[in-house]
Amino acid sequence: MTTYVYQTIPQVPGEEPSCFEIKQSMHDQPLTTHPETGEPIRRVILGGFGILNGGKATQQPVPSGRGCCGGSGCGCH
């Protein structure tokens, strides 16, 4: 099972999206509504933490700034 990050889709201008994680099979279709609240959601595509460079992984800086996960740097924004 893979853990996916989802984000709510704000319905009111100025409303902040919230992020959460759900474990799903990679063969499952992405969810479109929050399983508990029914709010519309979208799956967030996250990148890896390194880049292969001639067979050697190099560390890339994590984006800074305030994302929907409170500025944790997870790239969820």
Image: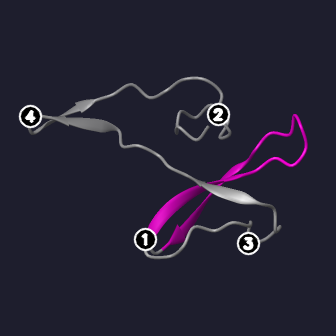
Name the residue carrying label 4: 54
- The stretch in magenta equals 1-24
Amino acid beneath label 3: Pro
Name the residue carrying label 1: 26
Q: Earlier in the sequence, mark 3 or mark 4?
A: 3
**Residue at the right extreme of this rendering:** 12
Label 2 and label 4: CA atoms lie apart by 32 Å
Q: Do labels 2 and 4 touch, CB within 8 Å?
A: no
Label 2 and label 1: CA atoms lie apart by 25 Å
Q: Is residue 13 magenta?
A: yes
Name the residue carrying label 3: 35
* Helix, strand or loop for disc 1: loop
Label 3 and label 2: CA atoms lie apart by 22 Å
Name the residue carrying label 2: 67
Q: Earlier in the sequence, mark 1 or mark 4?
A: 1
The image quadrant that residue 20 belongs to is: bottom right
- Looking at the rendering, in which quadrant would you find the C terminus? top right
Amino acid beneath label 1: Met
Residue 40, placed above or below residue 75: below
The image quadrant that residue 33 belongs to is: bottom right
* Helix, strand or loop for disc 3: loop
